[in-house]
Image: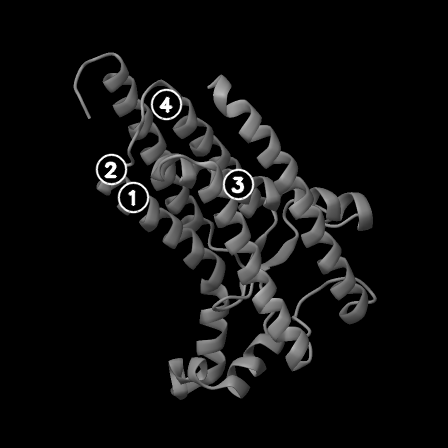
Amino acid sequence: MIKYIKSICWLTIFSIFMGFLETAVVIYLRKLYYPEGFKFPIVLTDDIIGLTELLRETATIIMLLAVGILTGNNVASRFAYFIFSFAIWDIFYYVFLKLLINWPSSFLTWDILFLLPLPWVGPVIAPCILSVTMIILAILILFFNDKKEVKIHGFEWLALTIGSSIIIVSFILGFIMHACSAAGSSGLKIFTGKVQLINQIESYTPVHFNWLLFIAGELILVFIIIRFVYRNKRRNEGWFIS
C-alpha cells in the first residue's frame, strides 16, 4: 500500500482544489441568479450559460476520469483512482461552500447535484454517503492490488452498475414523477420537447426523497465491497487462484 500513498496524496490535493473550483463557479452562479440565496425551483439561465454549465459538468467528469486513467496501472486501480478523486472532489465542494457562504444549513438541505440528462436532486447527505462509500471501495481495491494485481469480476461490475443506477434513479425520480404528473395525458412526451422540459424544470420543487431506493442501491454497493474483500482475502491466503 505504501507505493500508492504518494499517488493518493497528490490525487487528494488535486481533487480538493477541483472541489474549490466547482465551489467558485457555483458561488458565481448563485450570486447572479439567486441573490437572496439558493432555493428551488431552479432559475434557468440564458442559453449560452446553460450550455456552458452542461459542458462544464461533462468536462469535470472527463478530467476526473482522465486523472484516474493516468494514475492507475490496470483497470481496477484506474477505476479506484477515478472514484476516489470523484468522491474527494464532491465532499470538498460542500466543505468549501460551507466555509465561504455558510451553505448548506444542514445535511438535509436539498441541492441540485447534476443536470445531465435530467436534474438530479437530493439532500446533501445523500451524495456525501455515496462519496464515503466510493472512498472505502477505492482504498480497498488499492490495498489488495498492492499485494497482488486484482480484477473486478463481471458479476461485481454488473452489481456496481445496478447499485449505482438505482442511486441515480433515486436522485432523478422525483423530477420525472413531477414532470409526468404535470404533463397529464401527454406523459413522457415532455422529455422530447425543449420548451415543455424547461417548463417542468422551472416549476419543480422537491419535497420527498426516495430513501428506500437510495438505501437499496447503497446496500448493493456495500454487498459488493464485502464480497470483493472476502474474495481477495481468500486469494491472498492461497485458498484459490483468481
What residue is rendered at 41% in x and 42% in y? 218
The extreme top residue here reads 237
**Residue 108 position within the rendered picture, expressed as x and y whole percent measured from the top left:** 63, 48
* Residue type beneath disc 2: His
Which residue carries the number 3 mark?
A: 131
Q: Which mark is residue 144?
A: 4
Q: Residues within 10 Å of mark 2 (few under 14, many from 20)?
A: few
Q: Residues within 10 Å of mark 1 (few under 14, many from 20)?
A: few
Tell me whether circle 1 and circle 2 mark residues in contact (CB < 8 Å): yes
Q: Which mark is residue 157?
A: 1
Q: Can you tell which of label 3 and label 1 is closer to the viewer?
A: 1
SS for tag 2?
A: loop
Q: Residues within 10 Å of mark 3 (few under 14, many from 20)?
A: many
Q: Is residue 94 above or below residue 169?
A: above
Q: Is residue 89 above or below residue 9?
A: below
Question: Mark 4 or mark 3, which has the lower sequence index?
Answer: 3
Q: Is residue 203 visible?
A: no
Q: CA distance from mark 4 to mark 2?
A: 14 Å
Question: Mark 3 or mark 2, which has the lower sequence index?
Answer: 3
* Residue type beneath disc 4: Phe
Q: CA distance from mark 4 to mark 3?
A: 20 Å
Q: Is residue 214 visible?
A: yes
Question: Mark 3 or mark 1, which has the lower sequence index?
Answer: 3
Q: Is residue 87 above or below residue 172?
A: above
108 left or right of 219? Answer: right
Question: Mark 4 or mark 1, which has the lower sequence index?
Answer: 4
**Residue 103 position within the rendered picture, expressed as x and y whole percent measured from the top left:** 75, 50
Q: Can you tell which of label 4 and label 1 is closer to the viewer?
A: 4
Tell me whether circle 4 and circle 2 mark residues in contact (CB < 8 Å): no
Q: Which mark is residue 153?
A: 2
Q: CA distance from mark 4 to mark 1?
A: 17 Å
